Amino acid sequence: MHNITVLTFGEEIVEDLLSGVVMAATMMEMTSVKVVGLRASLPVQNSVSKHLGGARLATSTSPKLMTSLAAGGRVRCESSTGGGGKGPLTDAKRAIDERTKQEITKDDILRNQETNESEKKSVFGAKPTSGSVYPRPELERRPETGSKSFWSVMAFDGAAPETINGRLAMLGFAWAVLAEKLTGLTVLEQVFNPDTIGLVYFLGVVQLFTYASLVPIMSGESTDARSFGPFTAKAERWNGRLAMIGFSSLIITELFTHTAFFQ
C-alpha cells in the first residue's frame, strides 16, 4: 500500500492528467510529471475520491509515496519504506541474523593475527607481509576489513576459493555416491557421457554455489561470522577439505579401474 500526496488544481481540464499521475505513482517508485496551473497541495487520506472544481484526488497505499513540488512546476513522487523496512522477509532475515550471526571486528582480527600460530606464516613457511600478493596478513584477507574486490576475495589466500571448492566437493561426493548406486556410472561417465545431461547439471550447480558463496563475502561477511550449533565455519572447512581429498581420490581410482566405486 502507498500513501500519495496529490496536488490541487483550479482548472477541470487537468483532472485526467492528475489521474494519470496517481496511477503512475502507484506503479513506479519515482516519476516526474510536468503540470501547468498548479496552485496548492492537499494530503491524501485512506480513500479514493474525486471532486471537480476542488480537484482533490486521493488514494492510499504503502510503502509511502510522498509527492513533493520542485521548481518549474514539476511533481516528483518519491518512495519511502515506511515502518523501517518491515515485512515477512525482513523479519525472517532479522531473526536468522540474531541466532546465527556474530560481528567480527578489527580488534578481533588483530588479536587472532597476533596469537594464532597459523597466521604467523603460510603453509609454505613464508611470513605474511602487508601489501604482498601472497601471503597477506589476516587483516587484509578478511572481507570484514580488507578489500572486497573480486580479485582480492578470489586470490589464492582469499576468503572465497576454499569455501567454494569445499562446498562443491561436499555436494559432488554425496551426489557421486548416490548416482553411482543408481546408475552404475563413474563420476566422469555421469558428466561426459553423451547419453546423460550430467554436464548441464554440473555447470549449473557450479554457478549457483559460486554466486551464493560470493554474495556474503563480497558484502563484507566471512564464513566465520556465521554459526549455528555444531555448524561452524571451522567444521565446514574441515569437512570441505576431506571432501576435496575424497572426491579427487574417487575420480583417480575410477580412472584406473574403469568402474564405479560405489556399485
Image (tube, grey):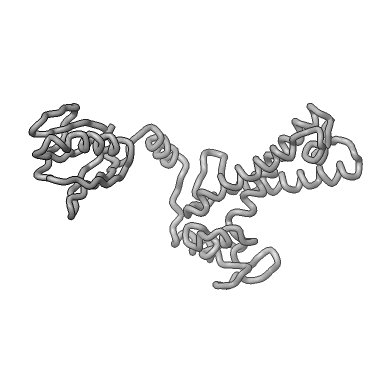
Relative to 168, say whether 155 is above or below: below
Relative to 201, say whether 221 is above or below: below
Q: How many marks?
A: 0
Of residue 89 and residue 236, the one placed in the foreground of this image is: 89
Can residue 239 be seen from the camera position used here?
A: no
Where is residue 261? Give x, y as percent: 84, 36
Residue 137 lies left or right of residue 42; in this view the side is right
**Residue at coordinates 35% horizontally, 34% vertically from top-left?**
87
Quadrant where the C terminus lies? top right
As drawn, which residue projects farthest toward the right? 257
Residue 262 lies left or right of residue 154; in this view the side is right
Relative to 48, say whether 8 is above or below: below
Quadrant where the N terminus lies? top left
Residue 188 lies left or right of residue 41; in this view the side is right
Where is residue 251? Give x, y as percent: 82, 44
**Residue at coordinates 88% horizontally, 44% vertically from top-left?**
255
Can residue 102 be seen from the camera position used here?
A: yes
Where is residue 151? Give x, y as percent: 58, 61
**Residue at coordinates 47% horizontally, 61% vertically from top-left?**
145
Where is residue 135? Give x, y as percent: 62, 67
Of residue 29 and residue 131, the one placed in the foreground of this image is: 29
Of residue 110 and residue 175, the one placed in the foreground of this image is: 175
Residue 239 lies left or right of residue 22; in this view the side is right
